[in-house]
Image (cartoon, rainbow, N blue to C red):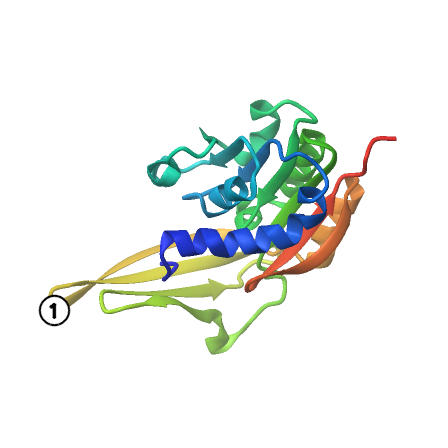
Amino acid sequence: MFGTPFAAKVAEQKTILEDALQPTAASRDLGLAIDLGSGSGFQTFALSEIGYSPVLAVDSSEALLKELQAHQGSRPVQTICGDLSKLNGFVSPATAQVIVCMGDTITHLSNEGAVEELLRSVADTLIPGGTFVISYRDLSVEVTGLDRFIPVYADEGKVMTCFLEFDRPDTVLVHDLLYNREGQQWRLEKSNYRKLRLPVDWLEDAMVRVGFKVHRGQAGRLLRLVGHKPQAR
């Protein structure tokens, strides 16, 4: 559904992460990096190619982690199938140089309280001077009418469309409609799930409250927030 080869997506994410991590990557030996909500590994492998070692990929989907492992080769990557909100149970405090949570992963948490708890866990897990990178979509402003329909991907055998339903003030209901061609017929697969409506101002303030110095930017079509944990005094 990404419409580009796997290696091209890794290269794309490497460029985005090099831009976000440049101050850290240029100034210290590259150590442990953690990819929260790693999926099939685009950011995981990008971090590895930048030079972070080891890279810990955390995701709740066994299928996606198996896809990641199929592309892993000799990269120093470790996988954990589990809930990213349980970060403190996977990694010791003050051990990670970089933690990323990208591709709209953070909006899949249950509520703002869960987001703040994750931010605290991330801050605890990072070394002094470490960096946290988030990319996501700000869905806090409701769209109406036909603007709620988003084309995702199309080729001769697949067509995917997303439909947004702004039925609650704190979440949006996302409907995925995937058409697969089978001979002369099209078969519809459909699913839905909720995403948080996180205003970027709120998320930045929440990062500041747990101690990050925050910079905004873009990661392709997504918003990007980079949080720097202060050096120890």
Side of 69 relative to 32 (left or right): left
Residue located beneath label 1 in the image: 184
Residue at 66% across, 48% down: 21
Residue at 23% across, 69% down: 156
Instruction: Assign the N terminus to one quadrant of the image.
Output: bottom left
Place residue 218 in its image quadrant: bottom right
Residue 22 can be seen in this image: yes
Decide: is 21 above or below 2.
Answer: above
| Residue 52 spot, x, y in % from top left | 57, 37
Residue at 81% across, 35% down: 231
| Residue 187 spot, x, y in % from top left | 20, 61
Question: Which sits in the foreground, 40 or 174?
Answer: 40
Residue 112 can be seen in this image: no
Residue at 79% across, 43% down: 209
| Residue 124 spot, x, y in % from top left | 71, 30
Side of 12 relative to 188 (left or right): right
Decide: is 147 above or below 113.
Answer: below
Q: Residue furthest right?
A: 233
Circle 1: element type = loop
Instruction: Assign the C terminus to one quadrant of the image.
Output: top right
| Residue 203 spot, x, y in % from top left | 70, 51
- Circle 1: residue type: Gln
